[in-house]
Image (cartoon, rainbow, N blue to C red):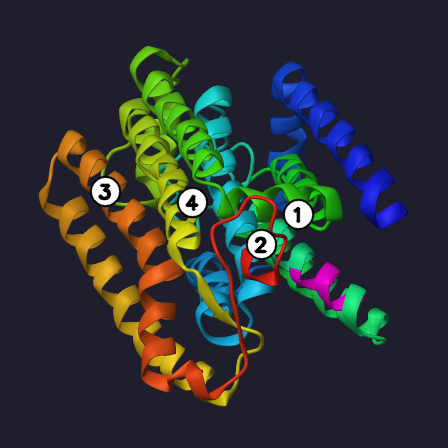
C-alpha cells in the first residue's frame, strides 16, 4: 500500500516543493553549495579526481543503456518500464535546466574547481535524477519479487550515494541540485511501480488510438524544448564564462548551454519510437532464455555503436539546426529498433515455434503480459 500509493504521492509533493525552493532561494543555495563543494575538494588528490572523472563520464551511459539491454536480452517486462523511467528522467532534467537556467558551481565560484567541464545548465542534476529513477525502479522491482529486500535496497543506496557525491565533488552541481534530482527521479521510479499506472501503459501498447495519443503527447513534449530554446532568454553573468575558461578549454556562452539542453531534450522521441515498436511486436516469449541473452546482446551492441557514431558525427560536423533534426530522427528510429526490430530478429533466429510463447492481437482489452 505504501509503496504503491502513498510514497509516490509524497515524492510528487516533495518534488514540487524542491522546484519552488530552487526557484526562490537560488542565491542562498548556490553560496552554501559552493562552500560545501570547496570544503570537500580541499584535500583532493589527482588519483581521487581520476576515479570520479570515470564515474562522471560513464555512469550516465551505463544507466541509460541498462534498461535497453534488459529489454532486449534479459527481461522485456522489467526492461520496458526501465526504459520509460530513464528516458523520462533524461528529458525532464534537460527541460528543467532550460527553465531554471542556473549555473554550475565552478561557473559561479572561482574557488570551486571544475574537475569535469560541464557546459549545460546545472539545475537539477541529470545524473542524480537518472540514477534515482533507474536504480530506484530496478530496486523496487527486486524488492517486489525477491526476499532479499535489504540487499537490493543497500546496493541501490550505495550506487545512488556514490553518483550523488561524485556530482558535487567534481564541481558540476550544488548539493541541492543533486537532492532535487534525486527526489524527482524517485518520483518517476515509484510512479512506474504503481500497478494502476502500469496497467494504463500496458493498454496503450495494444491500442492504435492510444499509441497515436501517446505519440502526440511526446510530440508536444518535444516542442516544449524547442519553444524554450527559441523564447527563453536567461540571465547570464560574464564571470561564469571567465570561471569556465580558467578550468576548461574553450569558451562558454548561454547559447551553448541552451543548445546543449535543447539537443538532449530530443530523447523524448526515443519513447515515441519505442511505443510504436511495442504496438507492432505481437509475439513475445513467456520468458527469456540464455539464447535470448546471447542473441539480444549480439544485436544490441552493434545497434548502440551505430547510434552513438551517428550522433557523434552529426554533433561534430553539423550546425545546431542540423544536429537537432538529426538527433530527433535518430532517436525515434533507435526507440523503434530497440522495441521491435531487435526482438523480432532474435525471435526469428531462435524460432519460437519450438517454445511456449504468448501470441496476442492488438486488442485494447487484452491485458496479456505481452503489453508489458
Total marks shown come to: 4
Residue 312's disc is none
Between disc 3 and disc 2, whose residue precedes? 2
Q: Is residue 104 above or below residue 61?
A: above
Residue 50 appears in view: no
Q: What is the quadrant of residue 235 in the picture?
A: top left
Q: Is residue 43 left or right of residue 64?
A: right
Q: In this orientation, which residue lies closer to the viewer: 14 or 354? A: 354
**What is the spatial separation of the Cα atoms under label 2 and label 1, in whole angstroms?**
8 Å
Q: Mark 3 vs mark 4: which is more N-terminal?
A: 4
Decide which of tag 1 and tag 3 comes sooner along the chain.
Answer: 1
* Near-viewer residue (110 or 89): 89
- The residue under label 4 is 271
Mark 4 and mark 2 lie on one chain; the one further toward the N terminus is 2
Which x, y percent locates residue 239?
38, 23
Mark 3 burial class by Cα count in 10 Å: few <14, some 14-19, many 20+: some
For residue 275, above or below residue 291: above
Position of residue 165 in the picture relative to residue 336 (left or right): right
Residue placed under numbered mark 3 in the picture: 329
Element type at mark 2: helix
Between label 1 and label 3, give the one nearer the viewer: 1
Q: Main secondary structure of the magenta part?
A: helix
Name the residue carrying label 1: 198
Image marks 2 and 1: residues in contact by CB distance under 8 Å: yes
**In the image, is residue 302 part of the stretch drawn in magenta?**
no
Asked if residue 280 is positioned above or below residue 153 in the image, the reply reads above
Residues rendered magenta in the picture: 138-143
Q: Disc 3 on helix, strand or loop?
A: helix
Residue occupied by mark 2: 81
Q: Residues within 10 Å of mark 4 (few under 14, many from 20)?
A: many
Residue 45: x %, y % from top left: 52, 65
Amino acid at each position: 500500500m505504501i509503496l504503491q500509493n502513498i510514497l509516490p504521492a509524497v515524492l510528487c509533493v516533495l518534488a514540487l516543493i524542491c522546484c519552488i525552493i530552487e526557484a526562490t532561494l537560488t542565491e542562498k543555495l548556490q553560496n552554501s553549495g559552493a562552500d560545501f563543494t570547496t570544503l570537500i575538494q580541499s584535500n583532493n588528490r589527482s588519483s581521487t579526481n581520476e576515479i570520479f572523472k570515470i564515474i562522471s563520464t560513464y555512469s550516465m551511459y551505463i544507466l541509460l543503456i541498462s534498461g535497453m539491454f534488459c529489454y532486449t536480452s534479459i527481461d522485456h517486462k522489467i526492461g520496458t518500464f526501465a526504459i520509460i523511467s530513464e528516458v523520462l528522467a533524461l528529458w525532464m532534467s534537460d527541460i528543467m535546466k532550460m527553465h531554471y537556467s542556473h549555473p554550475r558551481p565552478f561557473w559561479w565560484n572561482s574557488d570551486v574547481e571544475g574537475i569535469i567541464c560541464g557546459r549545460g545548465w546545472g539545475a537539477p542534476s541529470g545524473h542524480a535524477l537518472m540514477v534515482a529513477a533507474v536504480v530506484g525502479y530496478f530496486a523496487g522491482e527486486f524488492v517486489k519479487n525477491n526476499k532479499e529486500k535489504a540487499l537490493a535496497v543497500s546496493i541501490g543506496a550505495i550506487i545512488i550515494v556514490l553518483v550523488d557525491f561524485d556530482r558535487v565533488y567534481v564541481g558540476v552541481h550544488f548539493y541541492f541540485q543533486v537532492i532535487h534530482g534525486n527526489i524527482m527521479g524517485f518520483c518517476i521510479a515509484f510512479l512506474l511501480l504503481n500497478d494502476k499506472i502500469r496497467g494504463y501503459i500496458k493498454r496503450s501498447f495494444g491500442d492504435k488510438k492510444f499509441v497515436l495519443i501517446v505519440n502526440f503527447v511526446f510530440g508536444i513534449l518535444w516542442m516544449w524544448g524547442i519553444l524554450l530554446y527559441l523564447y527563453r532568454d536567461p540571465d547570464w553573468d560574464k564571470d561564469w564564462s571567465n570561471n569556465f575558461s580558467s578550468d576548461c578549454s574553450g569558451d562558454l556562452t548561454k547559447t551553448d548551454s541552451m543548445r546543449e539542453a535543447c539537443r538532449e531534450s530530443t530523447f523524448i522521441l526515443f519513447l515515441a519510437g519505442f511505443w510504436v515498436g511495442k504496438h507492432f511486436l505481437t509475439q513475445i516469449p513467456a520468458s527469456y532464455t540464455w539464447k535470448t541473452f546471447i542473441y539480444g546482446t549480439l544485436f544490441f551492441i552493434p545497434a548502440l555503436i551505430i547510434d552513438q557514431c551517428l550522433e557523434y558525427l552529426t554533433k561534430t560536423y553539423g550546425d545546431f539546426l542540423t544536429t537537432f533534426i538529426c538527433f530527433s530522427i535518430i532517436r525515434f528510429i533507435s526507440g523503434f529498433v530497440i522495441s521491435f526490430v531487435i526482438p523480432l530478429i532474435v525471435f526469428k533466429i531462435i524460432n519460437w515455434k519450438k517454445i511456449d510463447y504468448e501470441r496476442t492481437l492488438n486488442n485494447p482489452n487484452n491485458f496479456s503480459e505481452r503489453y508489458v
